[in-house]
Amino acid sequence: MSLKTAAAGGNVKHHKEPLFHLVKRTDIATWKKWLIRIVTVAAALLLSGIVCAVLTDGSNFIGFYEQLFRGAFGSTWRIQVLFQSWAILMCISLAVTPAFKMRFWNIGAEGQTLIAALASVTVIMYLGGKVPNAVLILVMLAASILAGAVWGAIPAIFKAQWGTNETLFTLMMNYVATQLVLFSVNAWAKDGSGTLGVLNYGSFDGLFGLEYIQNVVFVTVLTVIVFIYLKFSKHGYELEVVGESVNTAKYIGINVKKVIIRTMIFSGVMCGFAGFLLVGGSPTPTVNGTLVGGRGFTAILVSWLSKFSPVAMVFVTLLVVFLERGSSQAANSMRLGDTAAFEDIVVGLFFLLIIACEFFINYKVKFRKKEGK
Amino acid sequence: MDKTIALELRHITKTFGEVVANKDVNLELYRGEILSLLGENGSGKTTLMNMISGIYFPDEGHILADGKEVVIRSPKDAFALKIGMIHQHFKLVDVFTATDNIILGEHMPPYSVKEEGEKIIAEANGIKPVKGNEKFLWGLKLGLKLTALPFIKLGKKIKFDYLSKSRSARIETIAAKYGFEIDLKKKIYDMSVSEKQTVEIIKVLYRGAEILILDEPTAVLTPQEIDKLFAILRRMRDDGKSIIIITHKLNEVMAISDRVAVLRKGEHIATVNTAETNEKALTEMMVGEKVDLNIDRAEPVDPKDRLTVTDLTVVNRDGIKALDGVSFTARSGEILGIAGIAGSGQRELLESIAGLQKTAGGDIIYFDPAKEDAAVDLMQKTPVEIRDLGVRLSFVPEDRLGMGLVGNMDLVDNMMLRSYQKGHSLFVDRKNPKHLAEDIVGRLHVNTPGVRTPVRRLSGGNVQKVLVGREIAAAPTVLMAAYPVRGLDINSSYMIYRLLNEQKEKGVAVIYVGEDLDVLIELCDRILVLCAGKVSGIVDGRGAKKEEIGLMMTKLHGGENGATEEAL
């Protein structure tokens, strides 16, 4: 694809060359690519610092960076929280990846994770205390995975059979999941508060003697599995072909419908696992409408930014979580009020700039040569 | 012919990333001449013309129109300089009529109420009377005139936008002047390719173009239509217009042009007078080396029926019969050519055999040489079922990167498309495909940085070598190829012809869908001509006449036997 020359200014009499035009790059040196990205991340941080300084009347520019690191790595507990958050976001990012690689625009990870968390909590509500803890947790796992798989499979089946639009479908499924959670919580909350307190059963926090970070172990294993699945399995190959060209897939005899449904079930299963970790992997199992907290959407950005590579995803997720935790701490310590809002500003700036910088990796801007050279 | 220069290009360079599309190109176009721009695919012909018509902007160099340096930043600028381009892919609105498309985007001549008003006042001041009574009348008249101005503008606008009668008349004059045959009230979707092209040309003329650029205008036309087009182009030339025609077909260059400019790999090699050159010399300039332009055709050895298609009918989504009662037999050791205007059912025919197209009726029977020619029914089978039946059917589809290969995957993974399903392992085997890829790269001289390069980075010819190489590697008994040389350079094209011939000599039944009638006649043992989904006839490749096939393409059975059905 080549861009038309970009005309600069609305000058009608065209006696001059345009001020600049864009030239597509075919190849760019790896170091240049990374330089652009690193500069971009630095720019995002700089901008965040400026925003922080403006919000605190100019008193806290350097302080922002100090708090950023302190919030992420300031204490053992904070590091644990950092990795706990990493595990969940990473798990959901892994989950959405096969579907996106298949060019199935699944924006329903939020709902798939939430419905799985609800399934876990339902199991706790009805079996908690009645069966041994190990059995309870296994039943929770099975229920979560099943719920996630069903939530992922429904839009896939409709897409495969009747060609419905998966983006709208998965989005709507998110609302259904949220409403189901609200309904259930209302039904369970005996005190009429509409919120569910911390449940007494169902937590496997501290499993393998790893407090708080047993989730990290699970998700690391999952990362390896997804990496192998995408790269070396026949399934992974098939979904890539379907994503690249449905016509090619048909031409070589791939059952496209089957691949779509199968891949979305796999995606849903992983979201289900994330929902299970959110409930059981936490020392304080509970569920509410905002339990997933937008991570189902952040995961989409992470997955695309990593170009669907699970290895890259490890680092992108870490960076995002670092920014989230750090900026949240910064907002707290500087009394910026709504911490979540400031968190969103910092992470938003990062995503905005890092996605925009890809433009400079793909295109070169050529300026008009000075006249009378 | 007077020798005024209409357009001049000086030292034009254009790059896309590291690809140099045009390098230091100099070109002159005279008034009243037809200049052929000759070059292989990827030699930068279209890029060069796009810079003249305002689609690209040159990185370096100057463009001179009528001796003055100009800057062309958009197609609008180009039109202002009376340059019009007819692109390979037509840019017409399907649901509009020809007239609507031609006048589309035209603006009303500027009409400023303020300026007109000032004019009237100035005029009135010249005859300003002195007497009170007359002065009053004079003032009243002037006032009325001024008030009427906005309404006049509105009237003109309505007339321009909704009552296009005068413009229709102008279009008709243009059409009559150059001998276009067209129904201006016809909607574009009802038109044949040739009619659409006519609309494009009239559109450009209507806008007052003096320089016309035609990008491969003959690629989609039948021999008869090409003759008509050339007659029109000659009339335009005699009328003083300058025409650049982009092509890579030598016989057309010789037939139509006054001069030929040859491009190779983005560089301008030479501009010669057509009368002083010949096809061989031009080919050498174009390719840069001597090329053997002969296709050997061996006599078929022991031909046996391999594939029989009977009364095959396919109904497309719109309920129209894309194929209607098609019957033929493909024999081993023979190349069966399929000719026809683009979209006459070629794609549906091959895809039905390959199991990719839903069929409405008929029979497809394969005779398996491994089982003493036992008949195998291929009707309504999926590609997997066909393969599981042991039918060794290879298919080189028309859409190479959209169907035959995956552009973003490397050579190895593309080889794997055909083989990955083998075995029960959960994991793919990349070892054998890698060997196959290396083998094909070596044997077919594929120009690639390595077998791990995404195929979309390869040039068209190399992409096709990879695809054909893979399909041949499956040791087929039936090999179907749809437009396998489309967009390929001469050397690659002849390599593909040789490969097809090799397969034929191995006893494979080859089905070749082509568009170049000269090649079809030279290469094929028999040629099946399709016309609007029906078999118009099957002729022997030896002794077939181009005109005869051209006629059969447009009229069923060439208009003989009283069957004078018009082609769609």
Image (cartoon, coloured by chain):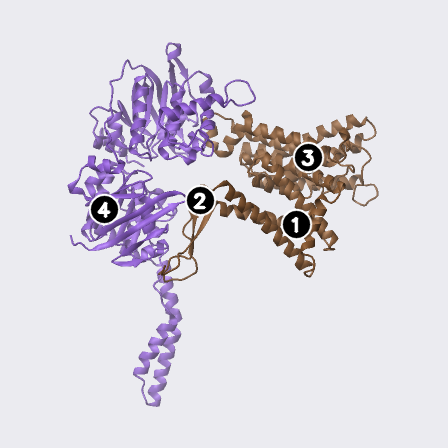
| Mark 1: secondary structure | helix
Vertical placement of residue A265 versus A56, above or below: above
* Residue that extends furthest to the bottom in the rendered view of this protein: B131
Mark pair 1, 3: CA separation: 22 Å
Q: Is residue B275 visible?
A: yes
Mark pair 2, 1: CA separation: 33 Å
Share a chain, discs 4 and 1? no
Q: Residues within 10 Å of mark 4 (few under 14, many from 20)?
A: many
Q: Front-most of B44 and B371? A: B44
Tag 2 and tag 3, C-beta contact below 8 Å: no
User: In the rendered structure, which disc, 2 or 1, sits on the residue that comes first in sequence?
Assistant: 2
* Amino acid type at image mark 1: Asp
* Amino acid type at image mark 4: Leu
Share a chain, discs 2 and 4? no
- Output the letter for the chain in brown: A
* Amino acid type at image mark 2: Arg
Share a chain, discs 1 and 3? yes
Q: Which residue is mark 1?
A: A344
Q: Which residue is mark 3?
A: A274
| Mark 4: secondary structure | strand
Q: Residues within 10 Å of mark 3 (few under 14, many from 20)?
A: many
